[in-house]
Image (cartoon, grey):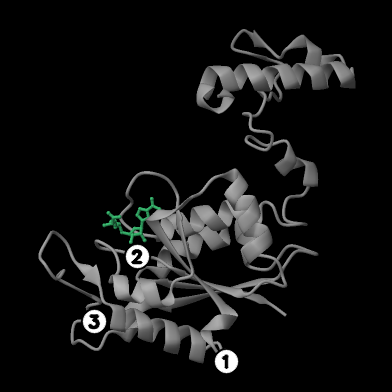
Amino acid sequence: MKKRIWILTLFPEMFKSFLECGVAGSALRGDREGAVKFEIKFVNIRDYSLTKYKSVDDTPYGGGPGMIMRADILKDALLKGVLEAGEYSSLSELEVIYTSPRGQVWNSQVAREFSQEYLSSSSKDIVFIAGRYEGIDERFLSLYVNRYFSVGDYVLTGGEIPIMAMLDSAVRFLPHVLGNKLSSEADSFEDGLIEYPQYTKPREFDGLEVPAVLLEGHHKKIQQWQEEQKLAMTKKFRPDLIK
Ligand SMILES: C[S@@+](CC[C@H](N)C(=O)[O-])C[C@H]1O[C@@H](n2cnc3c(N)ncnc32)[C@H](O)[C@@H]1O
């Protein structure tokens, strides 16, 4: 059975090239042999507006800048667009996730846990809600959202890019998504350090040679050099990780 990922958004078209391209795209289209089969379903929140101009937002009570997404419209998008359309018997069959600056901050470890907890074939289907404007009426969030995730301590104009970043980084940890299992294990952050420097052809480039140790074919020496380089790179580029 396919694992469905529902995305409630005002801009489904933003996901088009993401889903068409690269490893994450093919994993999420369900094209990777042996991997979890996903089905991405979009619900355009605007389709649930009852106003003439299809608005989904209104001014905040108490005043303040910007507009807030309406709880009643989001509720309809969730209950009619997902629950009913997806033939679920209750919301408890779904994990509803809102991307928001208030959420748990995303990193490699969180992505790995997310892939196990939310993207395995036995886990519940997921609903992502992409906020826009100044965010969403708190009453909808308190009634319907199970988890909050943030992609970092900065503010984006919408939740679509955070959803893509989360999915892209999490599917890499799923079995049969990356060609070589070791490639995610050797990546940055896996052991708390940055990746060692990598080289390919040509052997000489603009006067710079590939480090000699990599040409000698001595596996143990290469491994040792890579370990030293990881530490040196981390000290140089991300000294905060050493602490
Ligand atoms: C302009 S932001 C709203 C920011 C909100 N007024 C605040 O100060 O927290 C619009 C939407 O973008 C998304 N968003 C913005 N920054 C984000 C972040 N760092 N992580 C995850 N989602 C984010 C959220 O879905 C949010 O509802």
Crowd rating for badge 1 (residues with CA inside 10 Å; few <14, some 14–19, many 20+): few
What whole-number distance in Å separates the C-alpha atoms at marks 3 and 1? 29 Å
Which image quadrant for residue 160? Answer: bottom left
Residue 54: give its label. Answer: 3
- Badge 3 marks a residue whose secondary structure is loop
The answer to whether the residue labelled 2 contacts the one labelled 1, judged by CB atoms less than 8 Å apart, is: no
Q: Residue at x 61, y 58 (%)?
A: 114
Residue 131: give its label. Answer: 2
Q: Is residue 23 above or below residue 73?
A: above
- Badge 1 marks a residue whose secondary structure is loop
Q: Position of residue 222 (x, y in %)?
A: 82, 19
Q: Amino acid at mark 2?
A: Gly
Q: Amino acid at mark 1?
A: Ser
Q: Residue at x 39, y 77 (%)?
A: 143
Q: Is the residue marked 1 within 8 Å of ligand 1, measured from its CB?
A: no
Residue that carries the numbered disc 1 in the rendered image: 89
Residue 87 falls left or right of residue 145: right
Q: Is residue 35 above or below residue 157?
A: below
